[in-house]
Amino acid sequence: MPTSEAAFLRALLIDLNSLDGVRAWRQSSGVLRTLDGQRMAQVGLPGMADISGLARIGALGVRLEIECKAEGGKLRDAQVNWKTMVESLGGLYFVEYADDSLGARGSAKASCMRIAAVLDALRPRSI
């Protein structure tokens, strides 16, 4: 059975926030109906990643952006543009895919391990 992108995203948020020096949150973008159902409201900016956050790298905080995709999903043009902007300004951008064979929980654990490895490699080492 295909792994839901939403379930993968929720599980990944839990795992990311368990990492030392990382705080991550859901970042919604698109058009939503207001609670009264009478109006539509634009939230976020086109192409924003599903998850945003901060990671401590030495004495600095670095912006994290993580786009979650179902297995076989592809970035839209607006997402590619957002990725380029984040990286050009020194942020870290990850595209993480749910693996149907692992399910949402297993996919999130694997993605979190990959992200943690990148963050650890960027952190200064004491001599």
Image: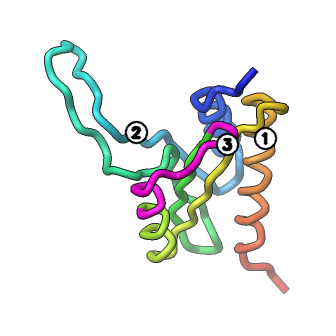
Local packing at callout 1 (Cα closer than 10 Å; few below 14, some 14-19, many 20+) is some
Q: Amino acid at mark 2?
A: Ser
Image quadrant in which you'd find residue 28: top left
Q: Quadrant of residue 6?
A: top right
Q: Position of residue 103 (x, y in %)?
A: 78, 28
Please provide percent x and percent y for residue 97: 68, 44
**Residue furthest top as drawn:** 36
- Depth check, mark 3 against mark 2: the one in front is 3
Q: Nearer the viewer, residue 57 or 92?
A: 92
**Residue at image point 20% right, 14% down:** 37
Residue picked out by circle 2: 28
Q: Is residue 43 left or right of residue 52?
A: left
Q: Are marks 3 and 2 in contact (CB under 8 Å)?
A: no
Q: Amino acid at mark 3?
A: Gly
Precedes in sequence: disc 3 or disc 2: 2
Query: Disc 1 marks which amino acid?
Result: Lys
Residue 85 is marked as none
Residue drawn where x is 42% and y is 69% of the image: 85
Task: Work out how far the residue at label 3 is from the one at label 2, CA to CA, in angstroms.
Answer: 21 Å
Q: Which disc, if any, is residue 109?
A: 1
Tell me the SS state at disc 3: loop
Does 53 sit above or below residue 125? above
Screen quadrant of the N terminus: top right
Q: Which residues are magenta?
A: 70-81
